[in-house]
Image: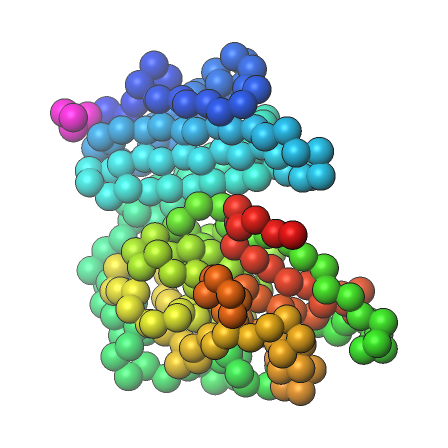
Amino acid sequence: MTTRSAPPTEADVVVTVRGSVAPAEKAHARAKVAHACERVGAPVLYARIELSVHDDPADPTPAAARAEVDLDGHVTRAHALAATMTEAIDLVVPRLRRRLEQAVHRGPDQRLRRRRANGHGAAPEPHSWRHGDPTPDRPAYFPRPPEEREVVLRHSAVVGACSPDEAADDLDVLGQTFALFVNAETGEDNVIVADGTDTYELLEVAATCSLLETAVAVVHSPVRPVPLTVDEAREVLDLTDAPFVFHLDPDTQRGRVLYHRADGHYGLVVPAGVPTD
C-alpha cells in the first residue's frame, strides 16, 4: 500500500464488524479513529478497527473494539471491552491515541534508557517490588477464614495478543497492579506487573521476549511459572503472602493467575477466550 503523507480521512479507516453492530456505531468508530490519527506526525499506511458483539447474557462486557494503525511500518494496536459498543469505542480510541503518541515520540535517548533498564545490569530502584519479594504496601484484603474462601473465576481483561508495551498501558487504564496477557512476539501467556515506579516487570514461561524497543521500561523477571493445580496455587499464595501466583494449568499448560480478592476470596484469572467449565 502506498504510504500516506497525510492522516487518513474517515473514508480511509477500514471498519469490520462481527455480530449486531449498528451503522451509527460503525460511523462513530470510523470518525474517532480518523481523529486519533490527525496529529501523529508520521506517515499512516493504514488504519482499521474491528467491532464485535456476542450474545452471551452472562458476560457483562459483550462489546469489543480492536483498533490497529500502521505508522510508517510500526503497527500500533489497542483494544477495549465494554457493556455497549459505543462505550468500547470510546475506551479504545484514547488508548490508541496514547500509543500512537508514544510511537511517534520515541528517540535515541529513550532507547538508550530502555536498553539500560532491560537486561544490561541495571538494578531495581530502591524500595521497588520484585516478584517474590515481600509486599508490605499491598492493599489489605478482608481476612476471611481459609475454610470460607471460594475461587472466583474471571477471564483476563486483556483481549488478543499484544506487546508488553500495550499490556502495560492496559494495566494503567484498568488501574491494576498486574495483568495476564498473550505476548504477540512469543505467543506465550505472560504477566506484566507494575512495581510502583516507572518500570514494569515481565513474567514469562521462557524469557525469550525482546525488550529493547519497548516504549516503557520493562525488565525480565527471574521467576518462571510452574504447573500447579488451583489447590496447590492456593497453598503457595497463603504460605508466601505474595500478591498473586502466576502458574501453569497442569492440563493445558496455559498461564493463569491466582490472587487475593479484596473480599477475602481467591480470584483466578485465565486467558481471555479460554473455555471454562
Residue furthest to the front: 251
Residue 82 horizontal/vertical position (percent) = 61, 36
Closer-to-camera residue (108/168): 168
Report the quarter where the N terminus lies: top left
Q: In this view, does 128 lie above or below 37?
A: below
Q: Is residue 243 visible?
A: no
Residue 228 horizontal/vertical position (percent) = 55, 75
- Scheme of colours in the image: rainbow
User: In the image, 63: left or right of 239?
Assistant: left
* Quadrant hosting residue 238: bottom right
Region in magenta: 1-5
Q: Main secondary structure of the magenta part?
A: loop
User: In the image, 220: left or right of 228?
Assistant: left
Residue 220 horizontal/vertical position (percent) = 36, 74
Residue 23 part of the magenta-drawn span: no
Residue 3 part of the magenta-drawn span: yes
